[in-house]
Amino acid sequence: MELAEVSVKKALKAGATEAEAYLKRTKEIRVEFAQEIENLKTIESLGIGLRVALDKKVAIYSTSILDESEISEAVAKAVKMAKVAPEDPDWRHMNKKFGKSNAQGYYDDKLKTLEYPRIVETLSSAIDLIRDYDKRVTPTRGALTLLESTISISNSYNESCERKETTIGVWMSAKAEEGNLKSTGDESQEARFWKEINFKELAVKAAEKAVKTLKAKPISSQKTSAVVRNQIFANILGVLLSGPVSADWVQKGRSPLSNKLGTKTASENVNVLDDGLMRGGLRTRPFDDEGHSTQMTPIIENGILKNYLYDTYTALKGNVESTGNAQRFDYWMSPQPLPNNLILKPGKASFEEIVRETKNGIFVEETIGEWLSNPVSGNLNATVTHGYFIKNGELMEPIKGVVISGNFYELLKSGIEIVGSDLRNSMQNYSPTVKLTQLTIAGKD
């Protein structure tokens, strides 16, 4: 925090009319493994993103910090860049409303006492579980990341704040072989707390998925209903909705949801919210990356579009209050309004009930390529790597290698038949299992 405050003072002294310092200190422990632990490394870093304004001219400069002389150099370069920057007619000022919400569950203090031998032992046990699940199964690849961050923000309005966060992520993969048949299975989980990662379950599910899909085959092209696993639909939700609900996209005319506040954009059983206060959420925090307090913001309520998400710049441009959604993916980047925790609110149906309610269709368990879908047009495309036929309410033979497609916004309006109760995340995106009335399948013919 002292470094942040010093940076701001230096920038004002150098001629900036406004200044903001964003400092990020990180300690990352990363373990990579296959059939055994292959490497373990620790990386520590400290970086600053300095944003300065000369009236309506704005610039940002960043650097990793070694000593105070680097800060002085960063200040000089940021001010120099601002002097030659074009004026931004929509620039008003930096955040003047620092604050902290009552967000909880974003820092695991027990990571400080987590020793390397325990990490290695935990992962080795998971590797053994994969290997022992079935003689046809081999652990193939995996990674564990433990990240501890300290964020310090200060600006020229005599405001400052600091927070500590932790994030744990693990991914593991298994391969099954039987004769000429081969298949793989992946599982992953991200959480704020070490104790929330279920290494045993991840290992068993990866191995199970590999074995069960050994005989998976493509199916013929068709249009059919689809039950989409919670974690997969959470990822789809993030890819296709995070940008369109951003006020930056709306104000630049990029969002298909522009000028649609108060209108019906989804069916009545669809409720989407952004919750920066969600206990244990992957982007839960007491204030955003400009120091504005976070909140819970309804986006879609009973099918009606209620709000967009704002940072300081877009809020002032739109003459509204910031929703506390300023995001910086790292210290060298400018803030932009994006979801904290984007959540499709769960319903009441269990996964088993959803499958029983499906006479004919497919269960989409794993996909790749959904990140190439188009959030502007709503064109959804993904390749199913793991899935099952559903016949008369039961999961039947496994399927793979087919492409599913549909229009995301049409699915929101009339295509989500059932919303499940089993909420799960893919990074900061959360969804239960959903049943879609119809998807187009491009199969083997």
Image (cartoon, rainbow, N blue to C red):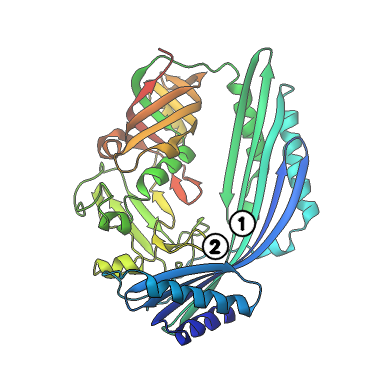
Image quarter of the C terminus: top left
Q: Nearer the viewer, residue 400 or 229?
A: 400
Return the x and y of residue 27 as percentages of the image width and height. 66, 62
- Looking at the image, which residue sits at the far bottom? 13
Q: Closest to the observer: 168 or 151?
A: 151
Q: Is residue 347 visible?
A: no
- Rendered image quadrant of residue 199: top right
Mark 1 or mark 2: whose residue is earlier in sequence: 2
Residue 202: image location, x then y, percent: 63, 39
Instruction: From the image, tell me which residue sits under label 1.
Output: 193
Q: Along the horizontal axis of the image, is 31 left or right of 335?
A: right
* 273 left or right of 1 in image: left
Amino acid carrying label 1: it is Phe
Q: Which residue is mark 2?
A: 105
Specify the amino acid type for callout 2: Gly
Residue 106 circle label = none
Pointers 1 and 2 in contact (C-beta within 8 Å): yes
In the displayed structure, 291 sits above or below 119; it is below
| Number of on-image labels | 2
Give the answer, above or below, for where 26 lies relative to 405.
below
Q: CA distance from mark 1 to mark 2?
A: 8 Å
What kind of element bears circle 2? loop
Horizontally, residue 106 falls left or right of residue 272, namely: right
> Foreground: 58 or 423?
58
